[in-house]
Image (cartoon, coloured by chain):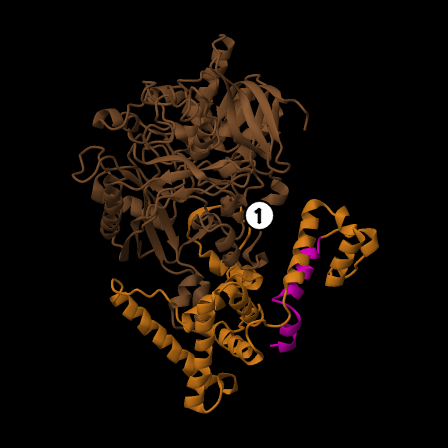
Amino acid sequence: MSGQTTFDAIVVGSGITGGWAAKELTEKGLKTLVLEAGRPIVPEQDYVEHVPEWEMRFRGMGDRRKLAEDQPIQSTCYACDEWSSKFFIKDKEHPYTTDRGKPFNWIRGRQVGGRSITWGRQSYRWSDLDFEANLREGIAVDWPIRYADIAPWYDYVEEFAGISGEALGLAQLPDSKFLPGMDLNCTERFVRQELAKHFGGERVLTIGRAAILTQDHLGRAACHYCGPCERGCITRSYFSSLNATLPAAEKTGRMTLRPFSVVHGISFDSKSRRATGVRVIDSRTRSTIEFRAKVVFLCASTLESVRILFNSATPEFSSGLANSSGELGHNLMDHIMAGGARAIIPGNEDRLEIGRRPNGTYMPRFRNVKSKHPEFLRGYGFQGGGYREGWSRGISQPGFGAEFKKSLRQPGPWCFSFYGFGECLPNHSNYVELDKEKVDAWGIPALKIHCAWGENELAIRKDMSIAAAEMLAAVSGRDIEPFTGDDPPGLGIHEMGTARMGRDPKTSVLNSFSQAHDVKNLFITDGSIMTSSSCVNPSLTYMALTARACDYAVQQMKNGEI
Amino acid sequence: MDSSRDLILPLDLSEREGREFGNIEFTKTSQNQSSSMQRRDVLRLLATGAALQLAPHKLFAVMREVRSFVHGQPMPRTLNAHQFATVKAMAEMILPRTDTPGATDVGVAEFIDLILTEWYDESERNRFLAGLADVDSRSNSLFGKELTGCTEPQQSQILSALGEKMVEDQDARQRTRMLSTSNETDFYPMLRQLTLTAYYTSEAGATQELHFEIIPGVYQGCNESSPIKEARDQK
């Protein structure tokens, strides 16, 4: 590592948005320092997607005691398993507090690539149904952008990332620039046909739109269907910073990537009212280093970026840098999940899936699209899909012996499940602040999170299980099991909204280009920028808004505005 | 069944060594004509530093093997010899050796001992061990001997009774789902869960029994040519 401390740009974080900022800024000619709090990742050593269960000590059941000790919160995420728990933080090193009875599961990854290594890869465009919702309903503040503003940037990031899926021409879920979609399985084809008959085109089942390559693309190989993407991908078939954007940034020769760099705060010059750089604690030596740059991009994640701004308070911004609005840390949202249903779908018993498709089906939002639902605003989409029961069905069967063993050689009946992802309304009283009593392993003040689902979210969750069961009944499902879980906020891992965009500096932190109203050379482009939450997975939108912000920032620099 | 092997080797390590190290290019100091590497060779490689000359992924394989060697426990740690023999007998009855390996071949009882020792909490462990003791009580009252001393039909009778009770409990739980506060699993479903997990996640269980492939290379959502049968015929 060179001793250089001055750059054109600093990007804080190397996850989905930090990777995009690194690529865009370096490709536009800026010497860019990318700061990552965690360790470097070497794909050849750290990726474990091809390590089979029999090479794992607990055969995939996880080291339960170690997880309970080191990662009690992280291990509530499905991906934090015996293979991938190393891509999640140790909870003890990263404390935060919540109100009694109001849990918030904050799931985090600190390493080069951040959570883009373990993300779910589902990629959907927003529509004007989403961008106009706050204005239409008089909730929170209006988005300062519309679909037309972001559409070319969706095109741009999709062409690089590679999104597989099926074009449907739906207004509420615009099509991406798709690579061919993955195959639907027998039961999914059947359910799709039957739903079309019963719901007259209002409820459409399609293959999940996923940032996974179905053909070779820009030097990355097509998926080989091994299954567990969250353990890494040596053929770089799914999109992540490590697999795609950071190598592109590296190729420009203008990126300096510095791992083990925990950003404590942003330095601010009162006279010019500009950020001058960032203060970093080296996590290995614990020494403090200051880096300087003309422009700073915060891509540290929804809650970490806000924590950095709180910890960067100055005399003129005593409640957090760039927080003249008082909205910093407020309006925290996540998607509400855990409502749905599953059933056995008779038929096709002589047919099989070959390969393990790391993707399911998607049903775009159908509530409050054409007609108004009496019990809640906005809506939800269903993920899920068809599958055959495997050997584990034998656990609850009484059989034993050679015949029993032989019966488990064949897969069990086909099943189908719907699993809802619902929109969460922005609510000023869901917020985070610094906890004066608590610091992390590097002495940096920690967050206190105040967040709970509102009535609208709970009504959405309830409707998910009812609508899902109704559809499974319509397609002649057997043993229909509706379910509603009680997942706390956070576990959707779509936390967003804590430094929202808006038209008015008095009620929002960022303008329409993710630029801080108060500090012109400070940009935030992670999930904190979101003014509302839609019901679709947000990462694709973060990517597009990051690329758009980078383009704007570089224009502003050329024009001498920054 | 070769029971002596189980006490010496953890799981199916002997099979794995040959498979895993078969394609390692050994350095000149460790010529190995049989292409099957012994543990002492692994340790010698590490001791001499020769392993460091291996390509990273091969070094990784060596380290993995050493790890499993160091962690491997030749003797059960929670189960005593009699309990171990009972678990082993029950697991083999559930998933016997047929044209493919059975529970004993893949070390199911060893895995169960590992889970009892390192994974279960105290109450689960106690419940499992109490249930295991109850198996002998049943067989003693029915046949005047412990399960391991029973004839095969007698053992089957006991397993059938345990299975019936399990299904009754499941049905009862289903009926009273709204009222039930207990999530505690009983011994027999615990044993079945661990037995099936250990078997189907073993190399033989996954690859020989279920034809699991690490890298399928393709995805076909609705294959019509009954590939289970075809794949079996090809082997």
**Residue A124 position (above or below residue B201):** above
Percent of width and height locating residue B18? 69, 61
- Residue A174 left/right relative to B29: left
- Give the camera-side residue of A291 and A111: A291
Residue A7 relative to residue B55: left or right: left
Seen as rendered, the residue at the extreme bottom is B144
Residue at disc 1, secondary structure: loop
Q: Position of residue B65 (x, y in %)?
A: 67, 57
Q: Is residue A501 visible?
A: yes
Residue at coordinates 42% horizontally, 29% vertically from top-left? A542
Give the magenta part as a residue range: B1-23
What residue occupies the far right of the structure in this picture? B29
Of residues B204 and A562, the one drawn nearer to the viewer in this rendering: A562
Would you identify the image quadrant in which residue B135 lies?
Answer: bottom left
Q: Which residue is drawn at 51% across and 63% down?
A: B119
Task: Name the residue at 59% across, 23% down.
Answer: A291
Task: From the viewer's perspective, tell me whether residue A513 is left or right of residue B82.
Answer: left
Which quadrant of the figure has residue A430? top left
For the residue marked with disc 1, what is the amino acid?
Answer: Val
Chain A image colour: brown
Residue A473, placed above or below residue A154: below
- The letter of the orange chain is B
Residue A62 vs residue A28, the one in the foreground: A62
- The subunit letter for the residue under badge 1 reads A
> Quick check: can you spot residue A179?
no
Question: x and y percent of residue B209 in the render?
Answer: 52, 63
* The N terminus of chain A, quarter of image: top right
Q: Name the residue under label 1.
A: A48
- Give whichever of B120, B159 is nearer the camera: B120
Q: Is residue A185 above or below residue A54?
A: above
The picture places residue A87, in percent across and down from the top left corner, at 53, 44
Residue at the extreme left of the image, as rendered: A374
